[in-house]
Image (cartoon, rainbow, N blue to C red):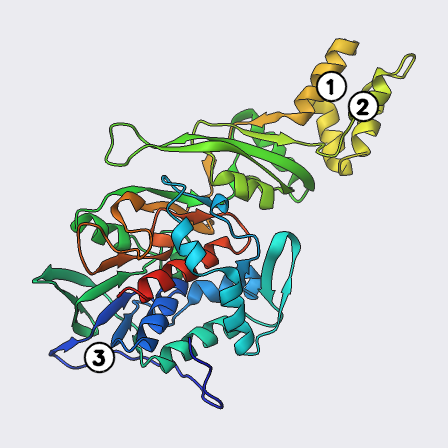
């Protein structure tokens, strides 16, 4: 990408078109989010005539709320193993083509200061607006025409050409890039347009579902919600199989995974980074397992109670638990995990239970609270190096619309940048 133009300010007013004729471009990009902006900028700076359409009145809305308003724009540890997909190898090509260091170089060229938090997460020092303004400036350098309030988008294809009709006018191009995102956070304008277009063109779709999302507890487990606000360092484990055999969506199989981070009890169930990470692998009917004492060694948390002649009652149990857990959680577990009979065998069983406490969530908090959407356009129907549909030349899908979902911590933004660059260099 080019250097930022000195002293230039990019303004993004309503670009709604009033012309009634069909306007010709080389590339039409649908969706002015992270992936769409990046792809349009890359293609435009290659000399391609690009129209970037979005049904919202403002571009990059999800960028602006990310990272608490400071945009966790990438992660230093961005390997393919940090992503979920029905094809775990698909993301490797794009991620190798455009790495975190490449995006960081762009950030630094624009004088955006940043800092690293835990686990390689990179954030802006000041505001997520800096990332959005950078991408808009890059689009301006590429001569990209940004068209906002483009509602009611419809697409047709014939004779190697795509025609896009919407409230902002009609457009045609030999290449169409779908960067419309997933279903997460509908209040920001999320829709299923990308999946609808994929199916219209004969591509398969892995069932979209909420990911990086709080889990809801019900039945007897709902009593945990009385601890709302309590956080603890845990190891969360989930995984297995997801899908509906015999339905229109393929079955997705995940490995069992473990994440060590904070768990937070909410008024509805469980959240916090550890649970959000595990939620991407959790399936309805499956279990979420928490290790409440990840640092325990040797005899374990209840070692003092197992010692010869030791006191064995609820007060002693609570005291042992308070050594490794917050006070409210320790008191609660002392009641939940009180061993019957207080024998060595019963105490050892409770120790094992504390290290593998099994929850059976009744669901998630849905797309409204999900940070991303898992599933999407089946990667078997796309070219890994270009993101182009195998069966439809000139049609590309990038970003969250594709069945590639990153872990928490900047990975989904890196997938947006990488997949966008792959398509932007190919259109």
Q: Nearer the viewer, mark 1 or mark 3?
A: 3
Tally of numbered tags: 3
Q: Are marks 2 and 1 in contact (CB under 8 Å)?
A: yes
Rendering coords of residue 334 (x, y %): 75, 25
The image quadrant where one finds the C terminus is bottom left
Q: Disc 3 versus disc 2: distance between alpha carbons?
A: 70 Å
Q: Is residue 292 above or below residue 95?
A: above
Counting residues from the start of the chain, the first of labels 2 and 1 encountered is 2
Q: Is residue 339 visible?
A: no
Which element carries disc 2, helix, strand or loop?
A: helix
Q: Residues within 10 Å of mark 2 (few under 14, many from 20)?
A: many
Q: Which mark is residue 366?
A: none
Q: Residues within 10 Å of mark 1 (few under 14, many from 20)?
A: some
Q: Disc 2 versus disc 1: distance between alpha carbons?
A: 8 Å
The image quadrant where one finds the N terminus is bottom left
Rendering coords of residue 318 (x, y %): 80, 27
Q: Is residue 186 visible?
A: yes
Q: Residue at x 26, y 75 (%)?
A: 48
Counting residues from the start of the chain, the first of labels 1 and 3 encountered is 3
Q: Residue at x 22, y 79 (%)?
A: 17
* Residue corresponding to mark 3: 17
* Residue corresponding to mark 2: 317
Q: Residue at x 51, y 37 (%)?
A: 216
Q: Residue at x 15, y 81 (%)?
A: 19
Rendering coords of residue 248 (x, y %): 23, 35
Q: Disc 1 versus disc 3: distance between alpha carbons?
A: 69 Å
Query: Horizontal placement of 9 versus 249: left or right?
Result: right
Which element carries disc 1, helix, strand or loop?
A: loop
């Amino acid at each position: 990408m080019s250097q930022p133009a000195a002293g230039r300010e990019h303004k993004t007013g309503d670009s709604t078109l009033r012309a009634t004729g069909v306007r010709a471009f080389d590339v039409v990009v649908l969706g002015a989010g992270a992936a769409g902006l990046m792809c349009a900028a890359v293609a435009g700076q290659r000399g391609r005539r690009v129209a970037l359409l979005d049904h919202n009145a403002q571009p990059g809305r999800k960028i602006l709320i990310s990272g608490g308003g400071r945009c966790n724009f990438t992660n230093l540890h961005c390997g393919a193993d940090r992503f979920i997909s029905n094809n775990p190898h698909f993301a490797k090509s794009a991620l190798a083509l455009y790495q975190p260091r490449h995006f960081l170089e762009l950030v630094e060229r624009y004088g955006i200061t940043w800092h690293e938090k835990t686990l390689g997460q990179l954030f802006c020092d000041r505001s997520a607006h800096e990332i959005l303004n950078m991408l808009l400036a890059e689009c301006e350098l590429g001569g990209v025409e940004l068209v906002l309030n483009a509602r009611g988008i419809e697409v047709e294809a014939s004779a190697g050409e795509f025609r896009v009709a919407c409230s902002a006018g009609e457009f045609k191009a030999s290449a169409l890039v779908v960067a419309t995102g997933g279903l997460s956070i509908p209040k920001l304008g999320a829709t299923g347009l990308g999946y609808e277009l994929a199916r219209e063109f004969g591509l398969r779709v892995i069932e979209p579902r909420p990911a990086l999302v709080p889990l809801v507890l019900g039945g007897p487990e709902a009593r945990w919600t009385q601890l709302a606000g309590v956080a603890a360092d845990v190891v969360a484990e989930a995984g297995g199989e997801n899908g509906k055999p015999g339905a229109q969506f393929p079955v997705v199989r995940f490995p069992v995974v473990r994440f060590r981070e904070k768990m937070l009890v909410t008024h509805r169930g469980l959240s916090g980074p550890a649970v959000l990470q595990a939620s991407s692998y959790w399936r309805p009917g499956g279990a979420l397992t928490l290790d409440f004492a990840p640092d325990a060694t040797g005899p374990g948390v209840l070692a003092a109670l197992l010692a010869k002649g030791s006191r064995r009652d609820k007060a002693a149990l609570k005291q042992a638990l308070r050594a490794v857990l917050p006070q409210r959680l320790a008191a609660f577990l002392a009641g939940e995990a009180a061993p019957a009979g207080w024998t060595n065998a019963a105490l050892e069983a409770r120790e094992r239970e504390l290290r593998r406490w099994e929850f059976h969530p009744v669901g998630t908090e849905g797309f409204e609270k999900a940070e991303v959407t898992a599933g999407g356009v089946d990667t078997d129907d796309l070219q890994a190096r270009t993101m182009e549909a195998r069966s439809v030349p000139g049609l590309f899908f990038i970003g969250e619309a594709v069945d590639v979902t990153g872990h928490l911590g900047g990975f989904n933004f890196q997938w947006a940048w990488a997949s966008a660059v792959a398509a932007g260099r190919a259109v």
